[in-house]
Structures are given as structure tokens and as C-alpha cells.
Image: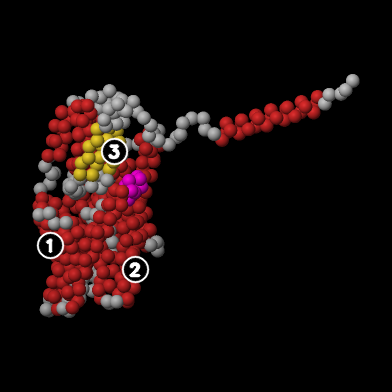
Amino acid sequence: MALVARPSHDRSERASRAGARLIAGTRRAVRPSGPPTDEIPVWTPPDGVNTATARAVIDLALRAGVAMLATGAGAADVNETVLLLTRAYGLRSVHVDVTFTSIGVSYHRGPDADPVTVLRAVTHRTQDYTRLERLRNLVLSLVDHPVDVQEARVRFDAVISAPHPYRRWVVTLASALLASAVAVLIGGGLLVTVVSFLSAVLIDRTQHALTRVGVAPFFSQVVAAAIPSLGATAVVFAGLKGSTVAGQASPSLIVASGIVLLLSGLSVVGAAEDALAGYYVTAGARSFEVIVQTIGIVIGVTLVLTVGNRTGLYIAVTSDASFTSRNLLIQLACSAVISAMFAISSYAVGRATLMSAAMGALGWWISSMLQSHDIGAASSVAAAATFIGFASRLWARRLRMSALAVTVASIVPLLPGMTVYAGISQIIAEPGAVGLTRGLPSLAGAAGIGLGLASGVSLGTYLARVLSAWRQGTSLSTAPGT
């Protein structure tokens, strides 16, 4: 009788089954069992909203988005606002496209109906934080308690057409006090402070008049930057004619204070926040706007300085080195005034102005303390801006005010006006390679300070959002903005 090799065959089968189980287990461990976690667009069934209602809701949401973008809101906040309004009225499959100059809303109504797509251009921009905050409050009230679309439109029109909280002369006075406080902060005496005040008044009125007649912002910056430079040249001329007060003054500080005033209106923070939020087109446009308008400042100052140097009216980069530039308490007071005055010139009111003053002083103190320990200027202001962005975001949520208004106003004392002027003056004073070798590093340092401010505020704001989302038990993408 022949013997059958049964044990060897059983071992082979067991090994085969073990290998199959191992492969299946490996597949289960490696391959996901659910759908992708990324937000990939999928087909959404019709939500049942009739065409007339959908068009009215989209028009309302689009008008709110345009108004927010025009008054200083970031692209992420605008996108969130439009989606909140449309979802509150039952529209689900809505796509929002925000750029620097336009907002588009597309409502997909399923495969058997034409989509509703509307595009609106943003033709006017201003920093109006009171109107921006009123718009946000209106949107939140409509989300919590939706009313008829026509009634919502009436409320929206009332917010848009409401007068500013301050008359125009108050804004002009706030801008002048801002420039004066900057002059005192960097060591200016009485004459420098007075001339800075008068120059700021002329800057505000001139820019307002040029804007009303349709002059491009670049040329408006060129003209405005020339005004404090002419004031400084007048002080130099008076000193050469025998004026003792003018001869002892530091006219370069007049130019520096004017540069800070002009830089304060640029959307550096908005560009950084849009970039971090993933709105690269809007961030790129805002950044390019900042660059173009900064070049306008440089050209305006350069034109006056070049003419002054050729006529013997050279404005040297000096400082009075008065007690104001060494006394920390006076520095903190000036920083608080600068931030508060910028908030007022941006139509912020009440608690937002007071909080801006407090955060401006705290930011200056942090930057000063770090620089006293031999930490670079860019790193110091970045750390101060991070604190400003973090604290402003958290406290603004509790006090129900615009965090953007507080953060933008609080970093104004840290703007590198004197560094920008020093770079321009060095390039003009020594034409050729020597001037460029000395001036470009100063301008690069000013750019580094600007980047430090923008990135610091954005980082602080992001950390505050993460903390708020963690406390509320929500994801970062669903955490409401302020």
C-alpha cells in the first residue's frame, strides 16, 4: 500500500491561509475604510429654494461681501460672511470667489437647472472699522434670526448709508496728532512737533481732495510724501537764515513722522492674513498695492531731497536725543496716543479706540525690552506684533469689537519711518555705488520690520483662533472670525 504525503500538504495549506490573512490584515491596516477626509466637492442635490428667493439672497450676501471687503475686511472673513448668509436662507451649494477687485458668487441648483452666478466689482476701499463691525453684527443677527429678504435688505441699506461716527475735521485732527506723537516718540522737539502737525493736516486734506477728483493712489502718495519733506526743507532754510530754534532742530524727524503716517494706511496686515488663509490672489494684490504705494512715498521724498541737496538745503539724518526719546513712560504715552489716533482716523469708536491705545503701549514696551537685550529690531517688533495679534483677537471676542481694528492700530508705533528715511537719505547724499551700499541695507531693514509686523500679527491671530477653537471644541475651519 502506497504512503500519501498528507502532513506536508496540510502544512502548505496552513502557510497559504496564514499568508492570505497577513495580506488581508495589512490591507485593512493601510487602506482607509471611509471616504477621503479632504473637502472634495461632490454633487449636492437641489435644496428646494425657488429662483426668486435664491436671487434675492445671493444679491444680499454679495452686497454684504462687497461692503466688507471695501471697508477693510480680509478675504477669509468676506468668504465666511457670504456663506453664512446664504446658508441661513437655505442655499447649500454656493461657491464664493474673492479677489482684490471683485467678488463672485455661484449657486449650483442641480443638473437640471441653470446655475445662478453673479459678479460684483469692488471699486472703492477705505478703512472704516465702525461700519465693518456694524455689518458683522447685522450678518450674525440675520444668521441667528433670519427675516424676510426684503427686510434684511432694508437693514443692510441702513448700515451702509449711516453717517460716519466722526466729522471729517476730527479725522484730520487725529491724523495730525498721530504725526505729532510720532515726532515726540522719536525725539523731536517743539518745532519739529508743530511742523509735523501742520504737515499731517496738509497730507490728510490733500489726499482727501485728490481721491475725490479720481487721482490714482500712487500719485496721491507721491504728492503726500513731498509735503513733510518740504516742511523739513523749510526748517533747514530757516536755520541757514539765522533762526536759532530752526538751527537746533532735527528736520529729518519731520519726514520720518510723515512717512509713518503714510505707511499706517497700507494693508500690510491684511495681505499677510490673506496669504496665511490661502487666498493667494488677494494676498498678492494687497502686497503689490503696498509695494506700489511705498514706492510712491520713496519717490515723493526723493524728489524733494534731491532738489534740496542741489540747492544747499541738505536734511541730515539726526535726532534731538531729547528726554522724550529716552524716557520710557513718555514713549509708552506717545505709543498709546499714536494707536488711538489711528483708530479714530479709521472711524473706530469706544472700546476699540481704548483697547488700541493699551495694545499700542504694550507692543512698544515689548519691543523696547527685547531690543535692550540686543535682539534685532525685526525680531523684536515681530514678537511684539505676535502678542498684539494674539491678545487683540482673544479680548476683542469677549468685548465684541473688531480685532482687525485693534491689531492694525496697535502696530502703527512700530512702523519703520525713520529707517525708511535714513535709507533714502543715504542713497541721495552719496550718488553711485557708495550710496546704494549704505542705503539699500537700511531699506532692507525697514522691509524686514514690515514683514515682522505683518507675520507677527498673523501668527498671533492664528494662535488665538486655534485656542478659541480648542476651547469651543470645534475645528479651526469652522471657528467664527471676528
Q: Residue at x 19, y 30 (%)?
A: 56
**x, y (%) of residue 99?**
27, 45
Amino acid type at image mark 2: Pro
**In the image, which residues are magenta?**
272-280
Amino acid type at image mark 3: Val
Q: Nearer the viewer, mark 2 or mark 1?
A: 2
Q: Is residue 256 visible?
A: no
* Residue placed under numbered mark 1 in the picture: 198
Task: Kindly indicate whether the residue at mark 1 contacts the one at mark 2 (C-beta within 8 angstroms).
Answer: no
Q: Residues within 10 Å of mark 1 (few under 14, many from 20)?
A: some
Look at the magenta stretch and give its main secondary structure: helix
Q: For residue 96, which numbered disc appears in the image?
A: 3
**271 in the magenta segment:** no
User: Which of the pair 110/274 is nearer the observer?
Assistant: 110
Q: Residue at x 34, y 73 (%)?
A: 437
Q: Residues within 10 Å of mark 2 (few under 14, many from 20)?
A: few
Q: For residue 441, which numbered disc appears in the image?
A: 2
**x, y (%) of residue 382?**
35, 55
In the image, taking residue 283 as reference, residue 346 lies left or right, namely left
Give the structural element (helix, strand or loop) at label 3: strand
